[in-house]
Amino acid sequence: YLTYALRGLVQTGAVHFNVCTDEAGTLLATSDRTGDVYVWDSIGRGFDSQRMSTFQRAGVGGAPIGRVVKAHSDMVTAMVFASGVTSDSTVPGHVAATHAATHLFTSSVDGTVALYDIARQELRTVVETDECITGLAWSDKQQVVLTAGMKGDARAWSIVANCPPIALWDTKCPHADALVGIVVPSMSNYVVTADGKGLVKVWDMVKNVCVQSVACGGALLR
């Protein structure tokens, strides 16, 4: 067996449900049942936490509007770091193309999806959906964040173009249960979704079509 050295221990006073790291392994994000999100710098400054719910909401041109905003009103369901975010900061809720810092997407039971700019300590965007979000994935190549929903819906949200989300829907063999997983293979144009009844689907994001469906023959869990 492997032996690991404990590098740090922090008592937060809250029960944390989700954990994710950035590609470099230097940032750790955790969340609790109240909708609060924390980012931990585990390399540069030991365990230095930033409570994301206290970040200020960004206004037009990236200027803070001067008030504290809590993005989620209920438990956070998923988190994903995005290191290649690009868009025009002159559009409200969008991030600057010249800013290369890591960003974090989070989702919640309340149906909201939030985008945080960690370096600027700003809540950039909050999107409201009509269902509980069960999973998130980020596509560097397509510059979209993908959401998986309790109703079996998968959607691609562009933060470059100010437009409605694109629904990934297969009329011949749709998901008939809540989505329990959504994954984007690195630097690809494909996304994989899975639902609670065991149906796994592969989607081509360029053509917006399902290219393969596989029935696993049993229930799948997240």
Image: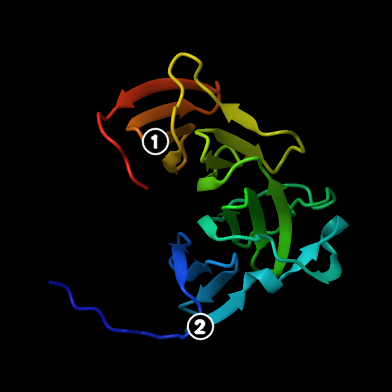
Query: What residue do we see at 62% from left, 75% from top?
Result: 51
Quick check: can you spot residue 98?
no
Residue 178, horizontal then vertical, whole percent: 46, 37
Q: Mark 2 = which residue?
A: 13
Q: Mark 1 = which residue?
A: 194
Disc 1 is placed on an element classified as strand
Identify which residue, 46 or 69, lies in the foreground: 69
Query: What residue do we see at 75% from left, 66% from top?
Result: 69
Residue 9 in which image quadrant? bottom left
Q: Which mark is in front, 1 or 2? A: 2
Single out the residue that lies furthest toward the top. 172
Disc 2 is placed on an element classified as loop
Residue 181: mark in rendering: none
Query: What residue do we see at 45% from left, 27% from top?
Result: 175
Identify which residue, 72 or 46, lies in the foreground: 72
Q: Is residue 44 above or below residue 158?
A: below
Report the Cα–Cα distance between label 1 and label 2: 34 Å
Labels 1 & 2 near each other (Cβ < 8 A): no
Q: In this view, does 127 lie above or below 167?
A: below
Identify which residue, 172 or 189, lies in the foreground: 172
Residue 62, horizontal then vertical, whole percent: 82, 60
Residue 219, horizontal then vertical, whole percent: 30, 37
Pick the quarter of the image with the N terminus. Answer: bottom left
Amino acid at dot 1: Ala
